[in-house]
Image (cartoon, helix red, strand yellow):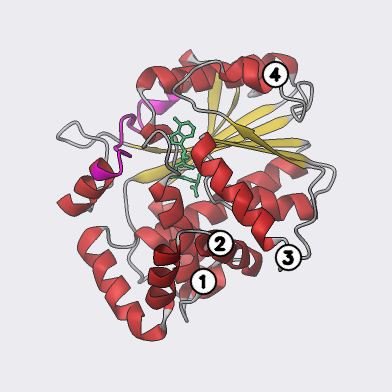
Amino acid sequence: MKADAPSATAYLIATSTLFVAADPRAGRLIPARAAELSACFVAARTRAARWAQAALRRKEARPFVSALERLTLPGIQLHYALRKLYLEETARAAIADGVGQVVIFGAGYDTLALRLREQFPAVQFIETDHPATQRRKIHALAAARRDFTRTQPPTNLHFLPVDLTRGRLAATLFNFEGYRADTPTLFIAEGLLMYLAPAEVDALFQTIRDCARRAPLVRFAFTFMEPQRDGRVNFLTRSRAVDAWLGWRREVFKWGIGRTELPAYLRERGFTLREIATGDTFRQRYLEPQSLAHLPLAAGEYVCVAEDFDEGGE
Ligand SMILES: C[S@@+](CC[C@H](N)C(=O)[O-])C[C@H]1O[C@@H](n2cnc3c(N)ncnc32)[C@H](O)[C@@H]1O
């Protein structure tokens, strides 16, 4: 991503959340509070972006946005919504299993920690992100506090700016006052690892492994993409315009791994695989019960839930 600019894809995801929330069929998949908070992040953009967003969210503009999505990456907005539902379920299950801390890497404008920390006041939430993106999020929340009375100064939500290309993540985390080294922890990296170089992904796994040495339980939920036949990491059904846009925003995909290689990759790094969720998982779990299985869904990004080796029973 551009060194001093907030992530453009994080903003795109917040916009998508709003767009899906306003959909007469798929809107019920988005929690009301997630839509409310996403609206506050979108509103905090530049005046021009705000104007464009307001125009795009109008009913008359929906066919235009849907057509644009069909031409570029069909079903991507629904995919974002479903991967978020899956990660929320993963987080709730981890808390039920005794996790007392949730650390989110590359949080962007995601609303999970903001919502769960209201519901689970005894659980610590830490959002880490590139400083430029995180600064924008904190400003948006501060501005919205006037309107969002529930967004009180949080005691169990902490923000930690970290550029993962700069190293020193472990030291930064261990020295962070909000981090509790001895607490069972869920780490989340949603839509992040593909933007990192392989060595940076390794460093992230190593950091989590270091955390696992001090905590009785460590789980890591992350999304990943597979390298395609041409060797490039990407969604299965996207147009060249998507590659061009990501290149322009300097948010190209760098790291990917095949689903079959993942168990060995995790084992080498001290983790065991708990589950992999695919588009089929999302369809069965969220779309079929709502009679929405016919809706297009972008394919090529998966969610993996892994656990620290020692605790994973291998
Ligand atoms: C595609 S967005 C995903 C945002 C959020 N996790 C979600 O899924 O809604 C990628 C996120 O990774 C963060 N990111 C990208 N490169 C980073 C880096 N070098 N260090 C820290 N964060 C980074 C961006 O700031 C952005 O928030």
Find the magenta span and give its range: 248-265
Q: In which quarter of the image is the C terminus?
A: top right
Q: What element carries label 3?
A: loop
Q: What residue type is labelled 1?
A: Ala
Instruction: Look at label 3 and name its amino acid.
Output: Arg
Farthest residue in the front direction?
47
Residue found at x 31% / y 30%: 254
Circle nearer the N terminus (4, 2): 2
Mark number displayed over residue 190: none
| SS state under label 2 | helix
Closer to the camera, 273 or 116? 116
Q: Which numbered disc covers residue 174?
A: 4
The disc label shown at residue 21, or none: 1
Residue behind mark 3: 146
Circles 1 and 2: CB atoms closer than 8 Å = yes
Where residue 99 sits: x, y (%)?
A: 75, 36
